[in-house]
Amino acid sequence: MSKMMKIAIVDDEQDMRQSISQWLALSGYDTETFASAEEALKGIGSDYPGIVISDIKMPGMDGMQFLKKLMGTDSALPVIMITGHGDVPMAVEAMRVGAFDFLEKPFNPDRMSDLARKATNARRLTLDNRQLRRELSDAGALMQKLIGTGPSMERLREDILDLGQADGHVLIDGETGTGKTLVAHALHAVGARAGRKFVLISCAAMEEDQLSKRLFGPMLPEDSQLPAVEEARGGTLVLEDIESLSDALQGRLLGFINDQGTPGETRIIAISNLQQQDRTIEGALRSDLFYRLAALRITCPPLRNRGEDILTLFSRQAEQFADEYGCDAPHLTAQEAAQLLQAPWPGNVRQLINLAERAVLQSRRGQGTITSLLMSDSDNMAPVMTTEGKPLKEYVESFEKMLIDNTMRRHKGSIQAVMDELCLPRRTLNEKMAKYGLQRSDYL
């Protein structure tokens, strides 16, 4: 575990820096050295993944000033101060400011290693707790990214909340661009492993030998990473493009799963991108591995089947890009809204995000239309079966809901401003908001 923590050594004497670095490196730590406090401050931030060992007496910024700067950046960062003989009062003052401990010259290397071990253990606990808090707050943020009020997205969010609490391995499938990796992150964030490691490996991005070493080891001595199965121990290991695994690697993965027992210490989330009619994930994996990975299964719905969510997604993305580029978001006409609803969306949400960005850029230049962008996409992408047609009433209602939703957000819930812009009496606006499940409190 010590290889995963850094130790920054700050001393103006080169011999001292090198001797400390060599000794700690032999103990398995990843060390980096700095000749001055000013130089060290450039490389040590609030979430520095390790500890600091610094001399007190240095030219320029001395150790005490350096310590105060570090405490101002991250008060939980362990700093071990090195003092000269007779500088004990200064060391006591350093402890009062926030130093973890101090070493008096000449010091025993074993004493230094012992302090480093205690300090890195404390640092690891601090960083783990911070990560846990981030994961818990991220869970809500991740779920909010799964935008949509249609039945397919409601079911997807329910599945994530349910399966997130389970212990079994999960198989996520669906068309490209439907957000499968986002779903994997959400499954981890809402479950019991939220504060533990989340390791994502793309099985299609590496040659077999490289992938074998990355997954199972042995890693080369110069590699700072652990094999993925070790790195993710106790947490979640996500394997994208699981169908790319060779028979040999499938066998090793199955052996790893079986060795863990039930429930497994490490949860595996397998993501499949197979979209070929003549090849399924069931056929791409050996049956015993498939049934272990597919104990729990989530299928991400294609965008073309998500109805009015298409308009909601487009509007949200267009507004975000408009803020980013400092311009107004393009306003959809009824014809453009209908075209968005009828488009086949072979690239799904990823395609929609790209289209929203291009629409904003076009609108800023006063050029082009959403219709032309959709036609360009259809020329550049493989054809996809579209859904059956819908009654005109459904298109009209989807467009109407989008207009009210967008207007309410732009006016931050001001009913009078929305009434004025849409030329609607108060009673009609209230009735339509109730019909479409829109609440003023969501826009304040």
Image (cartoon, grey):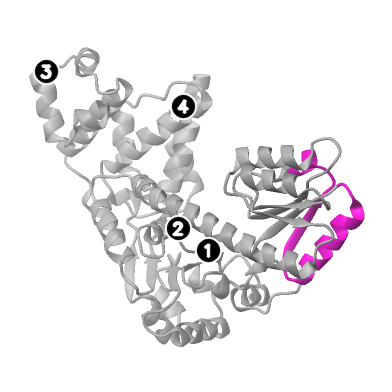
- Which is nearer the N-term, disc 2 or disc 3? 2
To which quarter of the image does residue 427 belong? top left
Viewer-proximal residue, 61 or 379?
61
Q: CA distance from mark 1 to mark 4?
A: 31 Å
Label 3 sits on what residue type?
Arg
* Circle 2 crowding by C-alpha within 10 Å: few under 14, some 14–19, many from 20: some
Q: CA distance from mark 1 to mark 2?
A: 9 Å
Residue 426 numbered tag: 3
Nearer the camera: disc 1 or disc 4: 1
Viewer-proximal residue, 243 or 381?
243
- Which is nearer the N-term, disc 3 or disc 4? 4
Residue beneath disc 1: 200
* Cβ atoms under marks 1 and 2 closer than 8 Å: yes
Q: Secondary structure at mark 2?
A: helix
- Which is nearer the N-term, disc 1 or disc 4? 1
* Circle 3 crowding by C-alpha within 10 Å: few under 14, some 14–19, many from 20: few
Residue beneath disc 4: 322
* Cβ atoms under marks 3 and 1 closer than 8 Å: no
- Which is nearer the N-term, disc 1 or disc 2? 2
| Image point (76%, 44%), residue name | 40
Residue beneath disc 2: 181
Q: Please, which residue is most extreme toward the top here?
A: 420
Q: Is residue 140 visible?
A: yes
Label 1 sits on what residue type?
Leu
* Cβ atoms under marks 3 and 4 closer than 8 Å: no
Label 4 sits on what residue type?
Ala
Residues shaded magenta:
12-40
Q: CA distance from mark 2 to mark 3?
A: 43 Å
**Picture coordinates of residue 389, whole percent (x, y):** 22, 46
